[in-house]
């Protein structure tokens, strides 16, 4: 974009492109080892106490011997995409230009598969660095239908996961998310609308709707991520492929009497196969 060998001065090129000259000299700094350690601790505290905000997380870090201020905790939480789970006007920051959709689940009894799907994003720590995981879950069965990893919090990996779930399992009646910018983005909502899927977004007071996937995140991290300490996204991807197969097909779910999510999703035939 900027050619330092061009006859036009760099200053003039920046003026034409409406860029600040400082962006030419900025070199992104890697996350320090101390910040990475703090982010891992914040993630663990958030899983244990999802209702903790930055003040209580800071207090918990103090109790664990970390000398850190609330402002830094808040900045790291924002970078991680982590926020407290409690009743508040906005559950997640949406892009101001994106359309917000109404909440469609109020008073709705969800007892069959493919009635309602839900999605959420979580932070995944690695031995060096971190990434983000999105998962799409069938609400009635708790089965993880698809998932994707990304090193940025954009909408592309969420759209990929959504398209894979639709290709494999068809379309739900309703798709529910929070109002995060990844889910209010046109690329995501257009995919839902083009498949005639009802779009539902959590509003004020709907913090409980995140609980099912919050429980999934706790299982994923304590049963796999924290035990394995993956060094790279490639390792995380391979490890999670094995874990989600276990979660769907082998792990008994607390809400279902001796049934796995796959048994509930696929019905009697899957239960007969598991018994065999």
Image: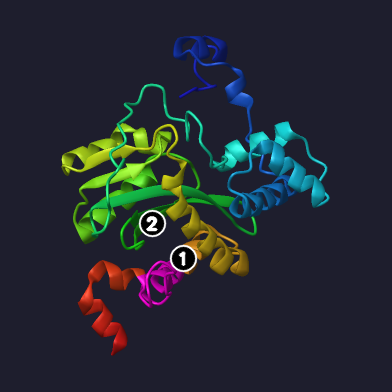
Residue 244 colored magenta? yes
Furthest-bottom residue in view? Answer: 276
Residue behind mark 2: 147
Where is residue 80 shown, x and y percent of the image? Answer: 58, 43
Compared with residue 255, is residue 212 higher up or lower down, i.e. above or below? above
Identify the residue at image location x=27%, y=80%: 271
Q: In the rendered structure, find residue 240 and report the number of the disc placed on it.
A: 1
- Which quadrant holds the C terminus? bottom left
**Foreground: 229 or 121?**
121
Compared with residue 263, is residue 13 higher up or lower down, i.e. above or below? above
* 121 sits left or right of 78 in the view: left
Where is residue 114 shown, x and y percent of the image? Answer: 23, 56
Q: Mark 1 or mark 2, which has the lower sequence index?
A: 2
Q: Which secondary structure lies at badge 1? A: helix
Whether the residues at callouts 1 and 2 have beta carbons within 8 Å, the answer is yes
Magenta part of the protein: which range?
A: 240-260
* 183 sits left or right of 104 in the view: right
């Amino acid at each position: 974009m900027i050619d330092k060998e061009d006859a036009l001065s760099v200053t003039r090129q920046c003026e034409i492109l409406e860029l600040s000259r400082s962006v030419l000299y900025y070199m992104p700094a890697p996350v320090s080892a101390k910040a990475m350690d703090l982010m891992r601790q914040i993630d663990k505290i958030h899983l244990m106490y999802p209702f903790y905000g930055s003040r209580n997380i800071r207090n918990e870090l103090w109790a664990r011997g970390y000398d850190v201020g609330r402002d830094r905790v808040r900045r790291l939480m924002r970078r991680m995409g982590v926020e407290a789970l409690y009743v508040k006007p906005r559950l997640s920051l949406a892009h101001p230009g994106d359309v917000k959709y109404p909440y469609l689940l109020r008073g709705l009894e969800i007892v069959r598969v493919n009635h309602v799907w839900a999605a959420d994003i979580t932070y995944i720590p690695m031995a060096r660095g971190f990434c983000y995981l999105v998962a799409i879950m069938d609400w009635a069965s708790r089965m993880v239908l698809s998932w994707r990893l990304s090193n940025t919090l954009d909408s592309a990996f969420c759209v990929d996961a959504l398209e894979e779930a639709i290709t494999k399992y068809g379309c739900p009646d309703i798709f529910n998310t929070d109002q995060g910018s990844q889910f209010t983005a046109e690329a995501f909502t257009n995919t839902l609308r083009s498949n005639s899927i009802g779009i539902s977004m959590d509003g004020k007071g709907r913090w409980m709707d995140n609980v099912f996937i919050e429980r999934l995140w706790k299982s994923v991290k304590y049963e796999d991520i924290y035990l394995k300490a993956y060094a790279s996204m490639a390792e995380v991807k391979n490890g999670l492929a094995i874990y989600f197969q276990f979660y769907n097909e082998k792990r008994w779910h607390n809400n279902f009497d001796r049934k796995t999510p796959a048994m509930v999703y696929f019905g009697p035939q899957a239960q007969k196969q598991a018994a065999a």
